[in-house]
Image (cartoon, rainbow, N blue to C red):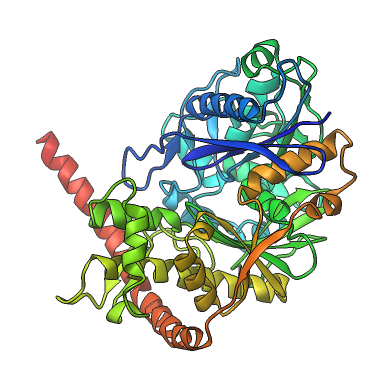
Amino acid sequence: MDHFVGIDLGTTGVRTVVVDREGALLADASLEYPLLTPRPGWAEQDPRQVVDAMLVCCRRALRAARVPRGTTVAIGLSATFHNVAPFGPDGALIGNALIWADTRAIRHSDDIKAGHDATALYARTGCPMHPMYLAPKIQWLRENGLGGPSYRSIAEYAAFRLTGVWACNLSVASGTGLLNMERRDWDEEALTIAGVTRDMLGPLVEPCTMIGRVTADVASGLGVARESVVVPGAGDGVLSSLGAGTIGVGQATVTIGTSGAVRLVAESPRTDRDGRTWCYYLSDGRWVVGAAINNGGIALRWTIENLLARRGRSYQRALAEAATVPIGSDGLFFLPFLTGERAPYWNAQARGVLFGLSIEHRPPHLVRATLEGIAYRMRSIASAVDQVGGPIRECRATGGYTRADFWLQLIANVLGRRLSVPSIQEASALGAAELAMIGVGALPDLDAAARFVRVERSVDPEPAAAKTYDRLFAQYMDLYFASALQFTRVADLRRELARDAAVADRT
C-alpha cells in the first residue's frame, strides 16, 4: 500500500488526511457537523451525522490527493473520548451520543463518589470520577428510560459503518472509566457501578489491529478497492501526541481546539495521588499522562459569537483587536467555565465569571480576557502534568491556536515555555494514519512514526510578559478558589429556578 488515510472525528467536525509511505501529506479535507445542546448541561452528537460527514470528507481527501480509483488504502480512525450511545439488540442506534462536554450526570457522579472508593477506582482506571465518564452517563440513561441492551462509542460506530465489524479499541476504552489499566480489560467493579455487563460493551482490540476490510458500499462510495483495510485507531487526544512526534521522554503536547489539554507519554500507567491528571492508552504498551480543560476554543467562540455578536471572518479581526489591549486586559479576568471543568479540580458545576468589569472595557478587552483565561487554565494543567509525568523538557503546540501568532505567543508567555509547532497541524488525523501504517506493516513501531514529524517553527516566551503573567496567574487562582463555593450554590439555585418554572408552566 502507498496511501494511508487518517480520519479524526472531533467535537464539531471531521478532518481527514492522506499521506504516503514517507508520511508526506498528499491532501487533507474537513467538514463540520452540529453539536447538539438541547438543554443546559447537555451536549450530544448524532453518530449518523458524524459518520455521514466522515464518508464525505474522506472521499474529498482521496480525490484531492488524486488517489486513482480502485486503489487499496489503509484507514485509521481518531475519535473523541468519553462519549456513549445506546444501541438496540440488532445493532441499530437508539439515541444520540452523550459526549465529553455533557454534564447531566453530575448527581450520579456525586453518588458514586459517596458510595464507592473513588480513589481506588481512579488508581485502577486512570479516570477521576466525573460526569463525563461512562458509569454516571450510563446510570443516567438507564434511570431516564433511554438505555439499551448495548452501549457503543462514536469511534466504534464509525469502524462498524466502515467494515461491518464491532470493535472497541483499547485507547477509547481507557477513557471510559470502565477499563482496568493493568489488565487492559473491563473493570468488574466499574461495570457493576455502571449497571452493565461486558457483553453489553464492544470487544476490546489493540489500536493497530486490522479489524476488517471496507464494505462493498464503502469501497464504492470512497472509490477505493474492496481490499482496503481499517484499523480502529485511538482517542484523538493521545493521537495528537503521536501526530506531533511527542512520544519521547519529557516531550509534551500543548493542544487547544474546542477544549484543551497537555499530555506526556509514559511506558506504564501513572496516576496522581491528588487525582489531578488522567491516564489513557495510546498503543503498543504506551500510556499518556495528561490533563484536559473543557473550555478552550469553545470559550473563544462563545465570547465572539454571543458577547460580541460577530460571525464568520470576524474571528481574525477579533484576535487582531485583542492584541492591542495591554497584558492583563486592564484588570479584567475571565474564568471560562462555560461547560463546567475537568482537570485539575474536576468541578463540573464551575461556571463562567467575568471579574473586574468596568465601564472603560470594550469588546477587545473581552476577547483578550477570554484568551488569557484559557491560557491560565492551560498553565494549571501543565503544572499538574509536569509533576505527575514529567519533568517536561519540550512542548509542541497543536490545534487551531497555532494558526494565530498572537494567541500562540500569549500561551507561550503564560506558560513561560518555548512552544514548537510541527509542520502538520492535523496531528490527531496524522496519528491515525500512522497507526494504519503500523497495522499493515508499513512502519515498524510508534518511534518510527514519530520520526516523520518535523518542527516548522518555535516561539519563545517574552521575559517581561512572562513575569507579568506570573503575577496575574496567582490572582486568577485566588479568584478561582474564592468562587468555588459559589459555583455549587449557583448550580443549586439554577435547578431550583428550573423546577419552579416547570411547576408554573403546569399550573
The residue under the point 26% across, 51% down is 310
Residue 488 lies, with reference to residue 96, above or below; the image says below
Residue 418 lies, with reference to residue 183, above or below; the image says below
Work out whether residue 41 or residue 154 is closer to the camera in this orientation and state it: 154
Q: Is residue 407 left or right of residue 121?
A: left
Residue 431 lies, with reference to residue 97, above or below; the image says below
Q: Is residue 81 left or right of residue 19?
A: left
Q: Quadrant of the N terminus?
A: top right
In the figure, residue 168 lies in which quadrant? Answer: top right
Q: Could you tell me residue 432's position as x and y percent?
A: 70, 41
- For the question of whether residue 236 can be seen, the reply is yes
- Total label count? 0
The residue under the point 74% across, 31% down is 203
Q: Is residue 436 left or right of residue 88?
A: right
Q: Could you tell me residue 150's position as x and y percent?
A: 60, 27
Work out whether residue 337 or residue 180 is closer to the camera in this orientation and state it: 337
Residue 460 lies, with reference to residue 209, above or below; the image says below
- For the question of whether residue 176 can be seen, the reply is no
Question: Which residue sits furthest left?
Answer: 507
Q: Quadrant of the C terminus?
A: top left
Q: Could you tell me residue 59's position as x and y percent?
A: 60, 24
Q: Could you tell me residue 379's position as x and y percent?
A: 53, 73
The residue under the point 51% across, 24% down is 48
The residue under the point 59% across, 31% down is 151
Q: Is residue 454 left or right of residue 91?
A: right
